[in-house]
Amino acid sequence: MTDLAQKARTLLDLHAAPEILTLANVWDVVSAQVVADVPGVRALATASHSIASTFGYKDGENIPLDLHLDMVRRITQAVDLPVSMDLEAGYGNPGDTARRAIEAGVVGGNLEDQMKPLDEAVAAVRAVLDAGRAAGIDFVLNARTDALVRAAPDAPRQPLLDEVIRRCQAFLEAGAPVVFVPRLVAREEIEQVVAALGPQKLTLISVPGASLPASELQALGVARVSTGPFTQRVALTALQDAAQELVAGGVLPADTRALN
């Protein structure tokens, strides 16, 4: 078994385990190295929003794919852990984008459905999985539905949850090992989705001030929780706060660590 295939198998096993997989998303080499050095970290995931912001682009496939993949390649080469990439919606060709990501050292990835017709979204899922098989790895696709992201704020919740479940079940039936539902934070709604999909199938994003703790999500049967752009925002908040303190006549925090 190749090293890449072994990393893919490891990442897949981490999603299937009863213990929740907690991923603090990274966006460059130093953030990846800092997170990888944390005891208990078993895998990494990149954040497309954060990588785009690093280069001055807005989220949503505005960063050129070559530039995006170059940063991801630098990350995979800098760490020994399995790395999952945010593929966004596949840049117009999900299968080829997944193939190129695998060549960059990636063994898993998120793929947005952008609420495209379900048959198109399922075809994209299959294309990514086919790219993994062609490369000889069990690519760990985290198939994302944007049913809640794109919903109107006042939209009735139950029809939205029904659509979430319909799409997630279709992605699982197409072969995706896990499915991702951003903006799903309420306990009772998480319970409903897990009941429909089964345990260790659902992945969520941890939203500051809104999400349940990872330990509680684990008890609910959630497979994985990640942080998306929020870890970069944590870092940038600390940077801006330190700059503000310094400009106001103060000093940098005394507990600053030499992490680079």
Image (tube, helix red, strand yellow):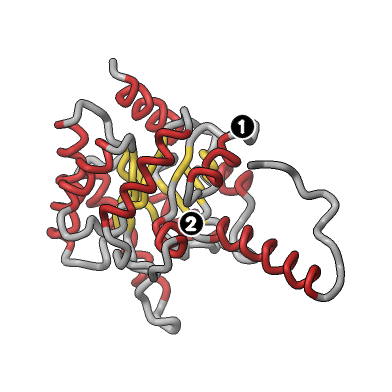
Could you classify mark 1 by the number of other residues whose Cα lies within 10 Å: few (under 14), some (14-19), or many (20 or more)?
Answer: few
Asked whether residue 144 is in view, the answer is yes
Q: CA distance from mark 1 to mark 2?
A: 19 Å
Q: Position of residue 110 (x, y in %)?
A: 34, 50
SS for dot 1: loop
* Earlier residue among tags 1 and 2: 1
- Is 171 drawn above or below residue 42 in the view shown? below
Q: Quadrant of residue 9?
A: top left
- For the point 52% across and 54% down, which residue is it? 227
SS for dot 2: loop
Q: Amino acid at mark 1?
A: Gly
- Is 60 drawn above or below residue 131 in the view shown? below
Compare residues 196 and 205 and report the one nearer the observer. Answer: 205
User: Which residue is labeled 1 in the image?
Assistant: 40
Q: Total marks drawn?
A: 2
Residue closest to the far top: 1
Q: Position of residue 91 (x, y in %)?
A: 22, 59
User: Which residue is labeled 2 in the image?
Assistant: 228
Q: Amino acid at mark 2?
A: Gly
Quadrant where the C terminus sits is top right
